[in-house]
Image (cartoon, rainbow, N blue to C red):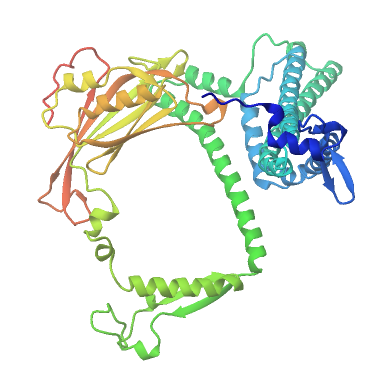
Amino acid sequence: MSLTLVKSALASRTIRKALGGEKEKSGIRLIDLRSQIKVKEGDEEKNVIQKIWNFFSGAGGWLMGALKGLVSPIASSLGGLWSMATQGVYQLFFFDWNVSDEQIDKQIKAAWEAAAGALGEAVGYALGGGLNIGASTLIPKIGPSVAAYALGEFTEEAWAEFKGAFKTIMNTAARTAGLLAFKGARFSIKAIGEQLPLPESWKKSLRSWGDGKKPFIVYKAVEEWIESNFDGMLEKFLVGKWEGFFEGWMETGMIVAGAIDATLAAMKAQKDQGGTPRTLEIDLYPKEDKAGSEGSGDKDDKGGKPEQGKVLLNAPQPLLKQMVYSTLAQHQILGDRSVGLLVGQPAEEFVAARLLTRQLTLVFRRGASKPPWKDGTKTAGTTTVTIPNPKVGLSWNNIKSACSKWTWGEFEASCLLSSGRILKVRGSSPDEARDKAKQLLALSSDEYHAINVTQEMERHPELKKRPQIAYPARGTLLVRRASTTLEGRTDLKGNRWTETPVHFDLWPDSEPPGLEPFP
């Protein structure tokens, strides 16, 4: 027997026919979708178009207020100003002082085009995200809640985009002002020089200033002067000193800028937390405990606890109470116990790894495979790798094989060894750094527990570690033996050690003649 369903005989349609009006005579349920996209707020109805308009009106007001408040934190950042000043001095030595006016105009145009692109990207990011969030209000029932949550998450990202674009514009404006000032000053100097009674050779030099034919960069000019007037060890010393000066200048500038901002932030936080700091002295051993107890440690001349039993706390008034509680709690836990009692092992093993009795130091030169170690016209860079606990019985050929050339770069492989030491090797890629570290570890008797590869993400363009071929140059095997005299190096346990270094070259293709077997 088959079952047959007749739509017109359904109970739901029969009831609708009896209760419905003209629109539901057929018994079919009709829904007016226009009523579904209206939301009541108070005494008035707002449809979807009105809601989207209100959303963008609010977002636009927020954006204008944010842009007004953007200048204040940037202008008041002393750390940022210090960083700009540091980079400005650096650029003076790397600027082409013979650049032509046409080249200056091209640089300014390119810089503003890049700034316009950054601003356009930020605006497009905000508009695209805002449109998507506005469209989310169309979702029935939960639309306003979804849009509000998404707007809160999106606001932080959009603000970061605008700050980055505004910073690019400010930097471009500063660079443009500097280039235009230099351009105008050079024009004035050349015009005045034509009017002065100067030798013709001087005037000829002034006329050729800014022709752009031969770049004049102070850094390279000084480097070339050193290489043309000195040679040997003195040349290498002066060139290395010149290069190291600018690297130290830039890195220290970033450190100082960060320290300035951190100090100002700490001062502001300190002010917000309670104003001027106050100092409180806590005596951990009150008068009734001055006699001390058995095994409680050293005592002073009066039989009580030493002066170290007093603690000075310095903080704003609201924080002092909390600091007192935490200090007393820590004293109850730690007391006079030594580090060895806390960690369960001898202090000298906990503080640092033990003294190395064998150590192999390998020196590589980047961009040059043999003396005089020149990479074009510049002195080749140096890379040093230290191998802890090298194997006994290594030959020159074993070391030479492990020190084959590789591509040095911005990725650093750090190997945690079984002796507690760390071996670090750089490479142009994560695989390059890791493989070279494993190859050099074959010379050590230690085993590695872990290898972590990190990448240098941000650095000044002039100091960025670009890929270079590193060649083996020389090595030093340092062997320490227990000393029976009062001479030598002393370790944490008071033992004395004598040191025997063995120096050898690694750049030749074959073992140097006369090289004695390694100890």
Q: Position of residue 247 (x, y in %)?
A: 51, 33
Q: Position of residue 47 (x, y in %)?
A: 85, 37
Q: Residue at x 77, y 37 (%)?
A: 16
Q: Position of residue 428 (x, y in %)?
A: 41, 21
Seen from the viewer's position, the closer of residues 351 and 183 is 351
Q: Does residue 307 lie above or below 252 as drawn?
A: below
* Badge count: 0
Task: Specify whether residue 55 is in view.
Answer: no
Q: Quadrant of residue 75?
A: top right
Task: Specify whether residue 213 is in view.
Answer: yes
- Position of the C terminus by quadrant: top left
Seen from the viewer's position, the closer of residues 212 and 28 is 28
Q: Quadrant of residue 384?
A: top left
Q: Residue at x 47, y 21 (%)?
A: 466
Q: Quadrant of residue 156?
A: top right
Seen from the viewer's position, the closer of residues 465 and 325 is 325
On the picture, is 85 further left or further right than 134?
left
On the picture, is 481 further left or further right than 219?
left
